[in-house]
Image (cartoon, coloured by chain):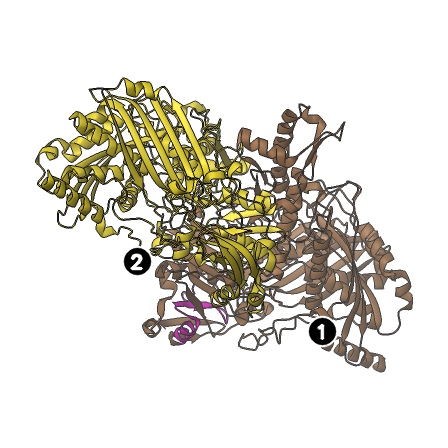
Chain colours: A yellow, B brown
Amino acid sequence: MKKQFSVIGKSVPKIDGRAKVTGQAKYTGDIKLSNMLVGKILTSPHAHARILNIDTSEAERLPGVKAVITHKDVPDLKYGISPARWDENIFCIEKVLFVGDKVAAVAAIDEETVYKALALIKVEYEVLPAVFDPIEALQEGAPLLHENFPGNVNTEIHQNFGDVEKAFAGAYHVRTDQFVGQRTYQCPIEPHSAISVWEGGKLTVYSSTQSPHYFQYYIARQFGLKMGDVRVIKPYMGGGFGGKLEPTGLEFAGAALAMKTGRPVKMFYDRHEMFAHNRGRHRQIMKITTGVDKNGKILGVHADFIMDGGAYTSLGVATAYYAGAMLPLTYEFENYKFDMVRAYTNLPACGAQRGHGHPQPRYAFECHLDMVAKDLGMDPLELRLRNARKPNTKTPNDFKVNSCELEACLEKARELSGWQEKKKSLPPGKGIGLAVGSFVSGAGYPIYRTNLPQAAAVIKVNEDGTSATLYTGAVDIGQGSDTILCQMAAEAMGFTYEQMKIVSADTETTPHDFGAYASRQTLMSGAAVKQAGEEIKKQVIEMASMMLQTDFRDLECREGLIFRKTDPAVTITFAEVAREFFVKKGPLVGKGSYAPPKLGGTFKGAPVGTSPAYSFCAQISQVDIDEETGEIKVEEVWDVHDCGTVINPALLHGQVHGALFMGMGEAVWEEVVFDDKGKIVNGNLGEYRLPTALDMPRVTSELVFSEEPEPAGPWGVKEVGEGATIPTMGCYSNAIYDAMGVRVYSLPLSYEKVWRALKEKREREQQG
Amino acid sequence: MKKQFSVIGKSVPKIDGRAKVTGQAKYTGDIKLSNMLVGKILTSPHAHARILNIDTSEAERLPGVKAVITHKDVPDLKYGISPARWDENIFCIEKVLFVGDKVAAVAAIDEETVYKALALIKVEYEVLPAVFDPIEALQEGAPLLHENFPGNVNTEIHQNFGDVEKAFAGAYHVRTDQFVGQRTYQCPIEPHSAISVWEGGKLTVYSSTQSPHYFQYYIARQFGLKMGDVRVIKPYMGGGFGGKLEPTGLEFAGAALAMKTGRPVKMFYDRHEMFAHNRGRHRQIMKITTGVDKNGKILGVHADFIMDGGAYTSLGVATAYYAGAMLPLTYEFENYKFDMVRAYTNLPACGAQRGHGHPQPRYAFECHLDMVAKDLGMDPLELRLRNARKPNTKTPNDFKVNSCELEACLEKARELSGWQEKKKSLPPGKGIGLAVGSFVSGAGYPIYRTNLPQAAAVIKVNEDGTSATLYTGAVDIGQGSDTILCQMAAEAMGFTYEQMKIVSADTETTPHDFGAYASRQTLMSGAAVKQAGEEIKKQVIEMASMMLQTDFRDLECREGLIFRKTDPAVTITFAEVAREFFVKKGPLVGKGSYAPPKLGGTFKGAPVGTSPAYSFCAQISQVDIDEETGEIKVEEVWDVHDCGTVINPALLHGQVHGALFMGMGEAVWEEVVFDDKGKIVNGNLGEYRLPTALDMPRVTSELVFSEEPEPAGPWGVKEVGEGATIPTMGCYSNAIYDAMGVRVYSLPLSYEKVWRALKEKREREQQG
C-alpha cells in the first residue's frame, strides 16, 4: 500500500475479543428469557413418503406441552431464494422429501417434555421410492420429488460465449476430464438456534443468522406481517460459512409456536439435526474440456456440470450459476460454454458454503489444466502465467475486472515456495502443487428482489466527543466485520479506533444491510461506513474552521486531532469540536449507503453473480504422501493474495488461515455419507472428519498490491474471506500428482483413494 | 385543546406495558451476567465517630471473597451536586457522619459470603458527640461535621426582592405562622441496584438511575476516565421520585470492585439500606409572615426557613433554593424576602423528592393564607382568586411566566367540588379545604456545570418505512416518557405511534439528555424529539413531492399518509416514500436538540430553578375526621390542572393520581423516625406507613387550557408529574381545619396530632 493511513492497515485487537475470550459474550443459545418455552421440530424418518395422517392428540395431552403444530397451523405459502423456485413449506403438507424433512413441532416447558411429546406424535406414512443420485434423478422414470419440476430439474443453465466448437476445432490440443465434488457440511461450531418472541403484534427473533435483514423479509412475508413488525437480532455468533444465510424451521416454526402460545420459544438444532438441515456444499459432477494452442494459450473452455441439489432449492440456483460463472475470471480466453443442471434428489437440500459453488469447479479446472500442461510438456506455473488475467479486462461472460494482480501473485508464490528448485529436487513421496483462484467482493444482485441499497450506516458521535457509535446492519459472524468497520469509520471520521463503539445486526436499531455472504461486507458495508464517517468529518471540520477562524480547506482531521495543513502546530481536538457542535447544532450524526454501480454479467436478465471487484490468488502447497497407506500430509502452504487494501492485517491473515483450514478439510477428509435409505451415517463431529489444529500445515500468507488501488472499493478494498478456499483442493491434488504421479478424480482426495490410485498405478506398471 | 392532533392527545397504551405486565421486563436487579460477583457496602453503626483503624485481613481470607476495599483503594476526590459543596467520599476517610455512612465494601461469589465477610471487617471507632436537630446544629458549640463548613452551615440563602419591611408597615394586617415539615423517603418499589462491568479500560454500569448521563459524568470524573469510556445503561425501572438522581455507593464502590476483580459486580440496597442512603425529603422549619390590605391583596411575604440537610449536600443546595423560589409563582405580589439555612446534622443526607423542596413550604404558605383569610373574614378561595397570578407576568424573583390559568383552575375546582354549598352545609366532622400549586417544567440550569444542550434526539426510519426508531437519552422511570416521546415523534413525523420503536437511556447508543428530574422531559426532551421528527417529515415530503410531481408546499403528512392539501385524494404512503428515500439517498434520519431560552431568576449569578414554563393547579379535598380518635379519612379530591397540551390523557391523569397518593402519604402518615443514637426505627415497609390503594380517596382530575398554548413547550406542553404533589398537604390541613377548627402545625398531620389538637381545643373551650 502506498498511501499512509491512520487507523486502517493496523492489526487492532478485535472489538469483541475480550467479551469472547472471557465468556461474557452471549450466543443465541445462551439467552434465557423469562417464561421461555423450548421448541423442537419432528422430522421425517423416510427419504420420500406420502403423509397419510398426523395425530397430535396424545402429545397435546402431555402435561407441560403448550402447543403442537403441523402444516395446518401455519400459512401454506412456499418459500425459497427466488420466486420461480419457491418450493419449501414450513411443514410438509402432502409428502416428505428427505430424512429430516419438517413434519410437526412442539413447544413445552422444558427439553425433556419436548422430546417426550415428539415421540407421542403419530405420523402415518406411505413410503415412496426415493432417488439419491442426481444422474439417476434426471433419468426418465425416476421418482419425482416436485410435481411442478418435471424430470427433477431444479435449475438448468446453458450459456455460450464466443464459439467454443470453432475454438476447439482450431486448437493444437483439446483435452476432456471429469471430476466429482462431494457433499460437505459447513459445521459451524455454534449450532443453529432461534428464540421467537410474539408481543403485541410484533415478532422479535434472536437468531444465529448471517442476514438478519433477509430473515426479517422472509419471516414477515411468510406470516403476512409488515417488515417493521418483525425484528431480527443477531447475538454473538460462532460461525456460519453460508449455512446460516437462510431462515430455517427454527425461525418459522418458532415464530408460529410463539404466536400460538404467547410465550418466548427457544428452538435449536443438535449436531445431527444441523447435518440433516444441511444447506452445505452440493455434490457436483464436472466435465471440463479445454482447447489450447501449442504455447499453452487457452482458446476455449466447455464446463458441463450436474449438481445434486437435494430436496429443495435453498440457495442452489445461485450456487449453480456461480459454479460456472467464476471459472473464466482467472484466465483470459474468449470462448466459453457452460452447461449446468441442478437436480432434485431425496437428500437434504444443499446451499451456499464458503466459496459458494466455486471451489469444486476450480478444483476440477486446476487439476485439468495441470494435465493439459503435462500433455504439452509445460511447467504448470508457466501455463498459468501465459493465460493469467490482466487488470482492466472483461471475462467472456461479461464480468468487468478492474484491479487484478494474478501475475504478481504467481510470481511471488513461485519465489516464496522455491517452486523452481522443488520441482526438480524434492525427495520421493514429496510433491509441490499449484492452483489459482478468484472470488467476488459481494454480489451485485441483492439476495431477494428489492431495489434497496446493499448497505447503509449511521454514525453518532457522543456528546463529549470522546466516543462514537457506529450503527450498521452488517453482520459479524466471527470474521471480524464489527472490528474492521469500526476501523473504517474511525479512518473516515479522522477519529481513533479505540473510541469507536458499535451496534450491529439488529433490524430495528441499525440501518439495513444484506449481511454476511458473498464476501460483501468489507467492500459494500465498508463503503456505506466510509460515507457516514466522511459526513461526520465534514461537519467537524466546518465547526473547527469557525472555532479556529481558519479556512476549512486548510484543515485536516486525523486520529482525533484537527490541525492546519499549512501550520500543523495549530490544533484542536476532535472531542472539543464535536462537543461544541453538540452545543451549537445538536447531535453529530453521519450517514451513508452503498448501491453497486451498474455491473455486467447477467443470468436471465439479472446481474447475478457479478461483483464490483474481484480478488485473485495463487496457492502453492507441498505434500508428503505415505506410499504404503496413502496418508496425505500437507507440509506447507504459500498463499499469495491480491485482495486490495488491507484494513486489519491480523484479521486478513486469519481469514486466509481459516479458509485454508476449511479447504484442507474438504480436500482431504470431509464428506457427508448416506446409507441406502438416505440417512446420514456420519452426522456428528466424531465421525465427520473435520480437520483439527494439529492437521494444519505451516502457512505463509502474503499479499501483493496494485499500483492503482481497486477503484470500486472504499480505499481500494476487495474480498478475502472466501477467496482463499477456492484454490486449495486443486492445489493439493496437483501436489499429490507431483509427488506420486497419481490423479484422484473425486473429492475428498482421501488416504484411501490415494492408496487405491497408487495400487492401480503399480499394477499398471507391473502389467506394462 | 383547540388544535386537532393525529397522535398526541390520545391515550395510546404504554409502549412497555406488555413487557411489564407479563414479567418480561428486566429490572437492574434481574440482570445476571456470567462470572458476576455480588458486592455490598459495610456501613457505620455510629452517627458520628472517628475511624481509628480498619482491619480487612480476616475478611480477605474468607474463601469466596474476591476483593475488600476501603478509602485506600479508591480516589479520595470528593463529589456532590456543586463544586463548592463537594463533601462526600466513596468511603469515609477520617470520620463517619451518620448511621449508614460508607466504610468499606466486599465483592464475593455469592450473597452469603458477602455478608459473612462484612461481619469479619474490624473497624475501630472513637465515638464522637452527634447532633440530630438543625437548630441545635447551628448553635455555637454544636458538634461539627465538616471542618470546612463552620457552624454546620451547608447552604445559606438570603434574597430580598422589593421592600418587605415597607410592605408590612403599610399593610392592613400582618400575620406570622410557623410550620414544620418532616423527613420522608421516596420508597420506590424497585430498590437501588447497579451492576458494574470493567472491560478493556471501559466501564459499563447498569443502574436504576434517573439520569444515566449525570451518572456517566460523575463516575468518569471520580475515576479519571473519559466520559466515552463510561457507559451507563438504565434497564426497566420501578420508580425514582428524585431518590435515584445521584450516583450512590452502589455505582462508585461497584465500579471500584469491578476494576479490582475484573469481574462484573452486582450491588444492591436492601429496603433498610435504601432508607439509610435516603436522599429523601428534608425536614424544614418554616416561618412565614404575610402582609395584606383589607381586601386580602398580598403586599409582601417573608419566608424564613431552616432545613435539616443531614450529613452531606446531596442535591440539597437546589432543594434549599427551590423551597423559597417557587412560593411567589402562584400569587402576584411585589415584595418578597427569602431566608434559608440548610444545616448539617448527623443523619442521612436529604435530597430531591417529588416536588423538590417545595411541597412543605407550599403546605406552610397555603395553611398560613387560610388563616389570613379567616382573620379577614374572607372565603379562602376568594382570597386566592384576588391574588392569583395571570399569564405573561413576572414573579418578584424574576421568574417569567407565559401561560397561566390559575384563576380558571380555581373556578373549575370550585364548581366541580361544590365548594360554595359544602362550605355551608357539610355535616359535623366533615370539612373541605383548598390549596394551589405551581411547578417548573424543567430547570433551566443544567444538573452539572456544562454547556451541553438539555436534550437531544435522533430518529431513524427503517428501510421499508413501516417503522421508525427513536433514540433518546430521556429516562422512563415508570412515568411513561418512552410512550409519550414516541407519540410526539410520530406526530412530528406524520407517522403512527404503533410503528414507533424506542431505544432510550443508554449513554452509548442514545444522544445525551439530562434525564428524569424537575419534570423536564415532556417539554425539553419532547422539544428535541419534535425537531428530529420534523426533520424526518421535511425529507419525506421533499421526496414525495418528487414522486408525485407536486409542489412540496401543497403536501401534508399525517399518520403515515402523505396527501395533497388541495386534492386530498392524491396520496402516497409514508412507507413507500421512506423506502424510496432509502433507495435514493440512504438512511432516513432526523435529529433534534433542545437548549432552554435565556431565562430570568438567578441564584448566585446562575439561572437556577427557573424554567421555560410553569404548570398551575388548584386542589380541593373533602375529609371526614373521627372526633374520638383523630382518624383522618380523605373522602374526595378534585384536582384541576393547567399543564398545557396533553400528550397522553391516561398517563397524565395517572401522574395526578400518583402525585395525590404520594402527597397523601406525606400529609397524613409518613415520617422517617430516628432513635436518640441516630438510628432509623422504621426503615422498612411494615412500619414506614406508605398509603395503600385502599387509602385512596375518590379523585376527580380535570384540566383547563389556555386560549394561547404555552409558547415555550413543544405543541404547548407543560409539566404535570410533580405539580400535583405540591398543594396536597396544605389542602388536607385546610380541610381538617374546616371540619374541626383545629390546625396542625407540623407534618405528618397524623391521627395522633389531630386527636391532640382536638383535645387541646376541648380543654381550651372548657377552660374558656
| Disc 2 crowd, CA 10 A, few/some/many (<14, 14-19, 20+) | few
Instruction: Locate residue A161 relative to residue A661 in the image: left or right.
Output: right
Q: Is residue A623 magenta?
A: no
Q: Which of A557 and B279 is in front in this view?
A: A557
Tell me the magenta residue range.
B91-119
Residue A566 location, x and y as percent? 36, 23
Q: Looking at the picture, tell me which residue is in the foreground, B562 or B595.
A: B562
- Do the residues marked 1 and 2 share a common chain? no
Relative to B195, B371 lies left or right: right
Amino acid type of the residue tagged 2 in the rendering = Gly
- Circle 2 sits in a helix, a strand or a loop, which is it? loop
- Quadrant placement of the C terminus of chain A: top left
Q: Is residue A733 above or below residue B636?
A: above
Q: What is the number of the mark on residue B222?
A: none
| Residue A50 seen | yes
Q: What residue type is labelled 1?
A: Ser
Q: Does the magenta stretch include residue B95?
A: yes
Q: Kindly identify which chain the residue marked by label 2 belongs to.
A: A
**Circle nearer the viewer, 1 or 2:** 2
The image's mark for residue B750 is 1
- From the viewer's perspective, is residue A374 above or below residue B27? above
Q: Nearer the viewer, residue A246 or A491?
A: A246
Nearer to us in this view, A479 or A758:
A758
- Residue under label 2, please give it: A686
Q: Can residue A560 be seen in this view?
A: no
Instruction: Estimate the spatial distance between the alpha carbons at disc 1 and disc 2, rounded to whole Å.
Output: 76 Å
Q: In which quarter of the image is residue B357?
A: bottom right
Q: Examine the image and state in which quarter residue A264 appears.
A: bottom right
SS at badge 1: loop
Spot occupied by residue A408 in the image (x, y as percentages of width and height): 23, 27
Task: Provide residue A407's location: percent of width, then percent of height.
Answer: 24, 25
